[in-house]
Structure formats: structure tokens, C-alpha cells
Amino acid sequence: MTERLLSVDGLRVSFRTRDGDNQAVRGVSFHIDAGETVGIVGESGSGKSVTAKAIMSLIQPPGEIIAGSIEFRGERLNDLPEKTWRKLRGNRISMVFQDPMTSLNPVKRIGDQMTEVIRRHRGLKADEALAEAIRLLREVGIADPERRVRQYPHEFSGGMRQRVMIAMALSCSPELLIADEPTTALDVTIQAQILELFKQLKANPDTAVALITHDLGVVAQVCTRVIVMYGGMIMEEGTVEDIFYRAQHPYTLGLLRSVPKRAGGGRERLIAIEGTPPDLLDPPPGCPFMERCPHAMAKCAELPPMFHIGPGHRSLCWLAEDDHPPEKSASGDVRHKEATL
Amino acid sequence: MSNDSKILVDVRNLKKHFVKSKDLLGRPSGVLKAVDGVSFQIRQGETFGLVGESGSGKSTVGRCLLRLYDYTAGEVRFDGQNISSLDEKQLKPFRRKIQSIFQDPYSSLNPGMNVLELIGEPMNIHGLYSGDERKEAVAALLERVGLKREHLYRYPHEFSGGQRQRISIARALSVRPDFVVCDEPISALDVSVQAQVVNMLEDLQAEFGLTYLFIAHDLSMVRHISDRIGVMYKGRLVEVADSDELYDNPLHPYTQALLSAIPVPDPHAVSERIVWTDAIAEGEAHELREVSPGHFVALP
Ligand SMILES: Nc1ncnc2c1ncn2[C@@H]1O[C@H](COP(=O)(O)OP(=O)(O)OP(=O)(O)O)[C@@H](O)[C@H]1O
Ligand SMILES: Nc1ncnc2c1ncn2[C@@H]1O[C@H](COP(=O)(O)OP(=O)(O)OP(=O)(O)O)[C@@H](O)[C@H]1O
Ligand code: SF4
Ligand SMILES: [Mg+2]
Ligand SMILES: [Mg+2]
């Protein structure tokens, strides 16, 4: 039996702003088992990074986790004191951030930043840590790492900085790696090399990878399961085959259609989903996709439940109502768990 | 793109070398040849795509065209004028005509400025509009890039990556440029927003006759948007051709390796990845030669 590494139940995160609460994540529930690579895709601004940061306990004021529970190997993380949490983070769960420039210190040499992390988590001596940093840089495809460790972030290209972040995240052999757009700044040959590293990490059956990406090609090639987000909620979830061959949700279908066709080239217009996502300061009470959905009907003004499409395949859309049963409400599960804790 | 429109950007044997940091013993260890002899032309109204290895010098080429750097050698002509040796005062009109949209929407917007200030700043520098007129112009631009008037007084951290990139685009367009260097303008966006932004860039190009240098890693998107594409490897162009020709008939082994590594959005697709390890040693690089009309490749 596979082991449940992470479960997130009924997560809500809001940011207080002058104009009201920005409800970035509005009730998100999912799980990740050991051995999986779960892709998280979705609209820009749909709450993917905020969800990841919540798991890492990195939501800072004015942001706040309003509700929900996050469990890692059965242990409820929300209740942990910051110190215990900090130890877990970076050691057993590590994250590659979307914005490498803001997460690297601009006035510190790359090597010093790397050895600091390696020493903290692995207790190595300075020269051992430096050797390890050099080895890791070579592993992520950076040529001449002996010289590169003495440079500063601005002397690296965008893709090289991103690889430094990946090397740091891999340095402690985490059980769960959350990678937020880890390969967007890389050319496809180096991307393939990095994805290969993730596969090696996953060769250990106790570990898992959560991959936030908008590159559907990457999702198709490396993920086992996919979560599709929109407007702070999960719209659809299933295996890669479910999502690429049997997608149910109109947003997922729109996303798949937006990819430029490979054959033919030419200058046809891309098929974008017209319109803009809902304002999360004042989100609609019904289906978040309603304003842009070609199938919207009167009923969609009410929020649909998750419908059970097949094993592990679910869709938050009224179109599934006739043929599929609704799932047990996730928030009900949360209340149950809170009561028993 | 018609072949008779004029050449707007003419890059001739451009070189940009950086002094390497010192080696382990503290000796300076020569130079890093980030861009080492690159030549290409972009016609008015055309989109020239630039792809290639991470660290191959694409962004450095872009920054040279923006004259953020002095060049080590070579020259860049913009609309017939050599901008290589102009001083800051002489450059001022070019600083308006040549704009940029950068890779990283997180660090390229000043966090302390609201949207009105961010988009209005270049207008201010170049003396376009003032007061309420400027506010109206900014609001109109915001709507043009798919944002709302309500966003005028918000700050960058309140937006998602996609929204920030729209702000950067509005900012670049605020001073009505002729040429825009787009350095991975869509890398941070989800595919449906990418499609919106690319459609928008194409519409704006048609409307204002803009010329683009489009640097990106998403090869299917580059093929879609570009008229011609150059492939960079280690500071040099190894192949230049019309987009479809490059994808259908790649000649350089690096281009072939690159194209074969594009991940296909189909879980059952089996792709044969061509691995090219035969790195070109320094000093051994070959010159681009025209092998068929408009198709240039650097092979022995
Ligand atoms: N510090 C903050 N203050 C206010 N709002 C924030 C803050 N951080 C994030 N948000 C808001 O939370 C929402 C979700 O943002 P998030 O970064 O999770 O999006 P995302 O899905 O990762 O998008 P992208 O694909 O563009 O990275 C957005 O509306 C964003 O404006
Ligand atoms: N300011 C600088 N000082 C020193 N070296 C630099 C500087 N800027 C760039 N470099 C070096 O020049 C080379 C080319 O960098 P550049 O940023 O142009 O690459 P790129 O092709 O844009 O890569 P990516 O696809 O990763 O963004 C790299 O080796 C980089 O480390
Ligand atoms: S619930 Fe209605 S509006 Fe929402 S995706 Fe389904 S059909 Fe469209
Ligand atoms: Mg994000
Ligand atoms: Mg770059």
C-alpha cells in the first residue's frame, strides 16, 4: 500500500488589503502519496503558489491561513511551533521557489549561500559542504562549478539561478519536493536533464514531487496525477490520462486548447480563453469559471459540488451531474478530523 | 512579412565579454565571452525569435540592443543610426523608441510604486502627457492589456505573475516604441494567459507596426510568434532560418537536439530525444553560411 505523505483539507488563505480580503485560496483539498509526481496547473493567480507556501508555512501577514488542515505523514502541521516546522521544512519537505532572484541573496556569493544551507541541514564541515555544492551544481548542468561558486547571483543567467535553487532544494534529499515553476527559465535540453533528476529523486519509493507548472508538455511527460486550479479552487483532478484524454471540466478543456498546435505552424490565432479570472476580493458565489464558460447555465450561479467521475477523477462542474455522483464534501471531512484530533 | 520592408535593427559582429571572477588562487582568469560575434537583421514589423541554451547569451544580446551595456566589439544600427558609441544624451530618443519586457515580472517592477506610477514613469521621463491626461492614458493602456481601471492604485505584490507581466507590457508600450525586446515575456504565465498575451502582442504589432525581438524557451510558442528564428549556443548563432523551415529542416546538431527535447503534451507520446554532447570548443566556432535562401547554419 502506498503511504499518504501529504494531505491538505479545506485550505483557505486570504490576504488583507485596503480594499478587503483577497481570498487567494478558497477551500482546497488534495493529497499526495509517496511515489507520486503530482502536477499542479491552472490560471495565473489561481492560488498555486499560495497553496504551496501555505504547506511550507510561509504565509506572511497580511496573509493568513483562515481554515483547513495540512498533514505530513499523519502529523498535523498547522499546530506545530515555528521552530519544529522550520526543521521539517528544508529537511524533509523542500521547495523550489518561482522567483529565483528574490530568493537568492544578491550580495552573497553563490557558494556561500549553498554551503550555508547544506551545513545547516546536513551538518557537514565547510570544505565538505563546498565540495557538495560543487557536485550539485555540476549535477544540474552548470559548467565549471569550481569557478561559479565564487560568483554572485547577477553574474548568472536566469536559467542558471533557477538551477542553483534546484540544487539547494535537492541538497537535503527531501521526502517531499515542491517545485514551483522550476524549469520555466531553462532551455528544453536542460529542462529534460532537471526532470531526469526529479525522476531519480523519486526512484526512492518513499518520496514524492509536487510540480507546479504551466507547461502541459512537462506535465504529460513526468506527472502521474494532475490537479487543475482556477479562482482559488480545484476544478478537476485525475491521472494524467484522465486529464489529457478524458478531461471533463470546461476550464481544463480550454487550457488544453490554448497550446499552440505543433504541425502546420502558420499564424492562426491562438485559442485563448476570453475574459479574465474572477476578482478574489469579491468572488462570485457560484462556479468561479461561470463568466468565461461556454456551457454556463442558470444553475452555475450556485457552486457545484465535486462530482466523482471515476477512481481518483473528480470535476467541480454541473455538467457532470447527470452521469456522476457528487463526492462527500471535503469540508465535512475536515470537521470530522478536527473533532477527532 | 514582406521582404521589402526596411531593416530596422542591424546587428553586426556583436561581442560582449565580461571579466571573469578570480580563480581559486585569486588570479583574474580571463574573460567570459557571453556574446561572441553575433550578426542578424530584423525588418520593420517583423518578429525575430531567439532561442538556445541557457546561458548562451540571449539576454545579453537583448541588453546590448537596449544599450544597457557598452559593447566589447561590433555595432548595432537602429533605423540606420549606429547606436554603439552614442553617449547618454544622444541615446535619449532611442531610449523611448526601444523598450523592453523582461523575463522576471517579480523583480522588474519597483515594489514601491503603484500601477499608475509604474506605467506613468516612462511617460514622465519622455515628457508624454501630464496630470489627468496621463491618468486617462494609463487607464486606457491597462484596459488594452486586459487589466482594469480599479487596478491603478494597487502595488505589484498584489498581482499574480500573469497580471504583473501585463503591467510590464503596458509600461513598455506607454511611450509608443518602435521596437520591443521581449525577454521571456510569457515564461511565467499559464498557457491560456500565454495565448492571450501572444495574441495581444500580435494585435499590437499589427496596430502600431511594432518590431519584436522575442527571446523564449517555449519552442512551440516561439515558432508561432516568430517570422524568423536564430538559435544561440555558447555566445554565437549556430542557425538562422524562417520559423517553419527551422522546425521542419533543422541542420545544426544543437538545433536538432533542442527540437527533439520539446516535451509533447500527450502522456502516451514517445519521443526520441537526440542528445548532443559534442560541445564546440572555444575558438573552433564556425561562421554562419547560407545553405538555402534565408537558411543560415554554422557547420564545419
Ligand atoms: N502578498 C500578497 N498580498 C496580496 N495578495 C497576494 C499576495 N500574494 C499573493 N496574493 C494574491 O493571491 C492570489 C494567488 O496568487 P498565487 O501567487 O498563488 O497565484 P499562482 O496560481 O501561483 O499564479 P502564477 O501562475 O501567476 O504564479 C493572487 O490573486 C495574488 O494577487
Ligand atoms: N553582469 C554579468 N556579469 C558577469 N557575467 C554575466 C553577466 N551577465 C551575464 N553573464 C554571463 O554571460 C553568459 C550569458 O548570460 P545570459 O543571461 O545572456 O544568458 P541567456 O542566454 O539569457 O540564458 P537564460 O536562458 O538562462 O536566461 C552567462 O554565462 C552568464 O553567467
Ligand atoms: S459549473 Fe457551469 S459555469 Fe462552471 S464550468 Fe461547469 S458548466 Fe461551466
Ligand atoms: Mg505562482
Ligand atoms: Mg536570459
Image: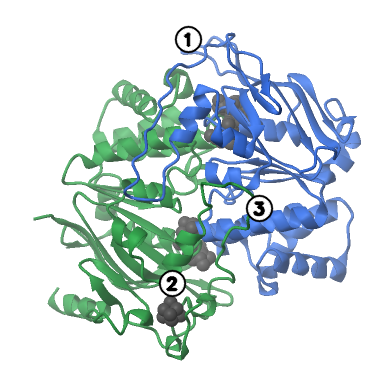
Which quadrant of the structure image shows residue B141? bottom right
Up the image or down, A90 lies above or below B151; here it is above
In terms of secondary structure, where does tag 3 sit? Answer: loop
Ligand 2 within 8 angstroms of badge 1 C-beta: no
| Residue on which the image places disc 2 | A250
Task: Name which residue type carries label 2.
Answer: Pro
The hue in which chain A appears in the rendered picture of the protein: green
Q: Where does residue B168 sit, x and y in percent of width and height? A: 67, 54
Chain on which label 3 sits = B
**Chain B shown in which color?**
blue
Distance between mark 1 and mark 3 Cα atoms: 39 Å
**Of callouts 1 and 3, the N-terminal one:** 1
Residue assigned mark 1: B25
Q: Residues within 10 Å of mark 3 (few under 14, many from 20)?
A: some
Tag of residue B110: 3
Q: Does the residue labelled 3 lie within 8 Å of ligand 1?
A: no
Displayed quadrant of residue B234: top right
Q: Answer left or right for B295 relative to A150.
A: right
Which colouring convention does the figure follow? by chain
Q: Are marks 1 and 2 in contact (CB under 8 Å)?
A: no
